[in-house]
Image (cartoon, helix red, strand yellow):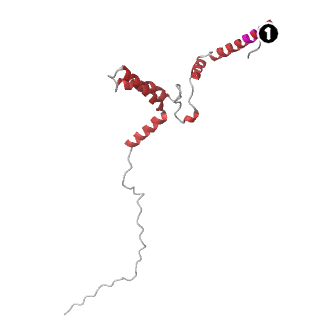
Amino acid sequence: MDIPVKNIFDLQAEIIRLEKVKQEQEMVLKQRFSSPSAIISSIRSIFPKAPEGEGSSGGIGSFFSPDLLSLVSRFVLPIALNKTLFKKSNFLIKTIVGLVSQKASTYISEDSVTSVWGRVKSLFGKKPSTARKPSTVKEPVLPPVVVAKEPLLKEPVYKPSL
């Protein structure tokens, strides 16, 4: 707001207006930093949240994402790789591994770990048996048996030949 200052009265009015704006901003800042939870929420508001359309990744671009596993993996994965696989590497290789592993850790989330764990668990779980259960085996359907009152075949009569 550029208000043209033409005389001393305009200047004094602008000074009073700016002092009021300053007091309002001071009150807002005091409220924002009045308690520890308010301070933490203010700090968290600095870091952007991931867009909702990202799916369940929970904040690839966010530092304080709700997914604790991805936050921990950002620090644990580079340290673990540098202490185990790249133990005797030079500084440049360890730096590159750290950068690449931090980038790769953004793809680690609770959903991805849960799905991988489910697949591994299904490999070692009970395998379905190949034999059929007795309840699933169908009995063959036989035609009804007709019992004749007279024998169908008569016994042969043997005549002794003399």
Q: Position of residue 152 (x, y in %)?
A: 36, 83
Q: Please state the extent of the stretch shown in magenta in the rendering.
A: 15-19
Residue 34 appears in which quarter of the rendering?
top right
For label 1, count other residues whose C-alpha is less than 10 Å away and answer few (under 14), some (14-19) or many (20+).
Answer: few
Q: As shown in the figure, which amino acid type bears the numbered disc 1?
A: Lys
Q: Position of residue 58 (x, y in %)?
A: 53, 32
Outermost residue to the top: 8
Residue at image point 41% right, 74% down: 145
Instruction: Judge by depth and name the residue closer to the eye, 94 or 58.
Output: 94
Position above or below: 100 against 39: below
Residue at image point 58% right, 33% down: 52
Q: Main secondary structure of the magenta part?
A: helix
Outermost residue to the left: 162
Q: Position of residue 38 (x, y in %)?
A: 61, 19
104 horizontally vs 11: left or right = left
Instruction: Judge by depth and name the residue closer to the eye, 54 or 28.
Output: 54
Position above or below: 15 against 53: above
Residue at image point 74% right, 15% down: 2
What is the tally of numbered marks visible in this picture?
A: 1
Instruction: Judge by depth and name the residue closer to the eye, 52 or 158.
Output: 52
At mark 1, the secondary structure is: loop
Residue indicated by mark 1: 6
Magenta stretch encompasses residue 111: no
